[in-house]
Amino acid sequence: MTYEQSRTLLVAVVGHTNTGKTSLLRTLLHDVGFGQISSRPATTRDVRAATISSQGKPLLTLFDTPGLEDGVGLYAWLEANRTSGKHHDGPERIQTLLDHPIAQSDYEQESKVLKQLLVSDAAFFVIDARDPVLPKFMDELAILQMCGKPIVPVLNHTAAEGHQAQVWTEKLARIGLHHWVAFDTVSPQEGGETQVYEQLVAVLPAARKAIKTLIAERTMEQAQRRAAAIRWLGELITDVSACQFVVQHRTDDATDAATFELQRKVVAHEQSCLRHILQIYGFRPDDARLSGLSVTSGTWQEDLFDPDTLRDFGVKAGKGIAAGGAAGASIDVMTGGFSLGAGTLIGAAAGGIWQSWQKFGQPLQYKLQGYTPLRVDDGVIEVLAKRQLALIYALQRRGHAALEPISHAELRDHFPMEAFVKLRKKARQHPQWSALPGSEFRDSPLRQQAIDAFGKAVLDSMQTG
Amino acid sequence: MVSKTPTLTLRAAVVTEIIRLREIEEGALDDQSVLAPARKQPTFTEKVTERARLLAIQTGDLEAYAHLIRAVTWVLILVCGFGILTGLGLVSSAISSDGAVQVPMALFALVGVNFIMLVIWGILFAAALRGDDVRSRGITRIFWEPLTRGAFGSGRTRAARAFLNVLQQRRADLVLFSLLSHVFWSLVALVGLFVCLVFFAFRAHGFVWETTILSETTIHNLIAFFAWLPARFGVPEPAWSDGVFSATIRETGYWLLSVITLYAVIPRLFFAALFWGIFGWQLRVLAIDLTSPGISSLRPRLEFTGHSVVDPAPDSIAAAHGRACERTFEPDVIVSLDHEPDLTSLQNDTRYWGVIDGAQTRDAFLSRLATGLECKVRMRVDSRLSPDRGSLRILSQIARVCLLQVDLTFPLDKERVSAWHEALDASQITVLENVDDI
């Protein structure tokens, strides 16, 4: 069966048992719910298909297959059952096996893999690069090569200590497999997915068009996911910075109660942001892999206002709530209207006066009435921003297999402090920008512009990093 | 980042925005019943808009959108009506009850005011293009403030906010209000022109230029300024001296009509047509911001690939079985499975046979066992490798002809060791109790 551009490209994901085939599929499909993953062997026992489409048109179908477990025995059987005249006809030899009763008994699982590979256009052969190159693995490869399909070896777990990728690539070259790709499903490198697909094009040039479309779509989706997550972060910083609670009776009890209430709302808002970011990256809140990032059941393990959490990020902030923090004021230029007439100008002036009242008059009114505005400390907002950004970094470079937290040093280097401070200050000036429950939230283009500017700075720092 | 979809209508964009705002404010809606039809759409944008449309039917937001469109239509009608009234008011200020047309007042009311407003619009438009916060103020605020502050109930308020949010994309709000402004002033100028035309055609009238503070030279210069453009179209400058036009009434009338047309009506109509075109283009390239909160998180649910089992799992998998024996004995022979990472420690042990790493070595070792010289075997297995049926088959084959104990070496990974124990127990193969086990 020769691949033609008019139909869906069929690729089987094959390999020894427990090497991460389903993990690779989850990563390529961006679907954490695909198949079952376990550290035990033989978790996948059926052949399962999932299709990736573009603009409603199916481009690529990936087949998850059971692990090969007895390459030694199967290779020996194939050698023992050579038919004269068909020594060099690999697919014919595989078909002989599939027609034999042993394909339904001892080698039932291996036969499933081979049957699928025969009707596929190519295969990803997943290798656990932590394993040494053993003869049984080479037997498996030899059997797969008999199917006459292009094979792309995918070296998994290359981020693990003591991996043997170098030895593997040398061995692969000796059997004519030069188009391998290192792709760690636990901690994939930036652009790793593209590299996997590019190697597929290298062994199956006819699939270039479909794969290029897929790569372009994936790249766009990745950029969209990143932008969306950063947008949430910008919204969170804005909401918390702008938020202002007014204590009507200036007693310790009232202030403590309001402080507690504000803390509770900020924490709830942060958790909501966390859940949305996880959703964007296709992670379920209860995903066990998030425990490495201090996230359990969709919530941060460490309370934002816990002094230990703040200390971890090098911040000293007491209760994390400051009383009497007045909004930073800036004079708005009254810009007038859109020349529909004198009424417009009057309206514009009224708008300007209203804004000026919000900035100058309201704090003054609070002071005269004995009210105390409460605001979240700068340090707390910094911690909040940093740990969400650390999460985004970790999710950004993860596979759908596991997560590795970003180090404090790495985060420090990539945190756009200047843009963060600018957004925080700007939000402080506009209490109505806070979407925290209980606030009189009003979105505005200026608010979106401020968030967009912050998002751009984060993206820039990501790209330079 | 926005994604362009040619089929996206204003209605789809606004309804999607309404649902987005609703879900942000009130939490995610239960969309189980609409997911299936939404997933059938070809692109992610279409999936999102279809989901929003179906949800909007359930929540009544589609009705809120219809109300909004009616409200916007009424606003447009009011603006037009106000424009007509303004035109009538301005032109009447230039015509006395005795039929005398005050030319300077006519020029100021029908051309001058229009021109000043055009300049103000130009300045504000340029400022807005530079990114100033103009567009959130002024007339947009007058129009939208009541709508967005809950004056019409939460559903309709949300629809209004959604409409404004969609318009703010690619600054369509700026274009729309520019369009409104130009339409308004076009109407003012057209009404002025029409009233003057009718008045000049059917009423006795005269033209005067009465002023107390402008000098004669200034008036001459003003007339020359306004006469320059009509002269390009063959309308001559009317002669004037001592507050009275000495040209014929008809010539002065034509001149005044041409001034209003060329300096007020045509520029405004030009801008109105231009912004109409731009606004139409903006509607055609309308897009959903796929990165916006509330939309971005939908991707995993809407882009769900769907899986299908093409070859089901068997009821059972053929398993090899060995023969259990005592756990502690001194072996006659030691052998490694697959490989031996610690060969140096075994080199001097005469009991060490070597590595079984394929069919040939397996057969060779089984042949040796068949001699019956050795009947106690210790198999060294690297527990870092994953257990597999092939290994278990070899171990079972050996266990069936001799006493076999498996020594799980390198017990570094607890889960792997446990997996080996489980697999060996299932195959009835004895595992050597290792003091180094974790």
Image (cartoon, rainbow, N blue to C red):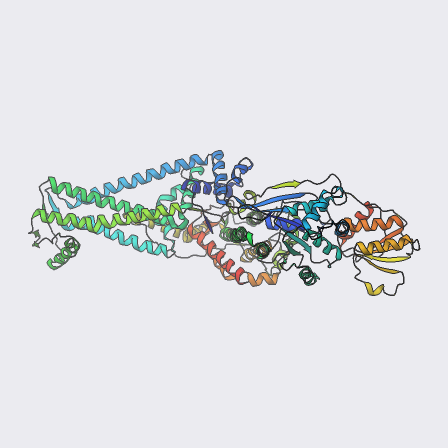
- Asked if residue A327 shows in the view, the reply is no
B69 to the left or right of B27: left
Residue B396 drawn at (x, y percent): 84, 48
B353 to the left or right of A208: right
B349 to the left or right of B97: right
Residue A284 drawn at (x, y percent): 61, 46
Of residue A130 and residue B136, the one placed in the foreground of this image is A130
- Please report the residue visible at 21 percent of the width from the left and 44 percent of the height from the top: B190
- Please report the residue visible at 48 percent of the width from the left and 57 percent of the height from the top: A456
Furthest residue toward front: A85
- Please report the residue visible at 30 percent of the width from the left and 39 percent of the height from the top: B78
**Quadrant housing residue B436:** bottom right
Of residue A120 and residue A343, the one placed in the foreground of this image is A120
Residue B214 drawn at (x, y percent): 13, 56
Residue A442 drawn at (x, y percent): 44, 47
- Location of residue B375 with respect to B341 vertically, above or below: above
- Please report the residue visible at 62 percent of the width from the left and 60 percent of the height from the top: A407
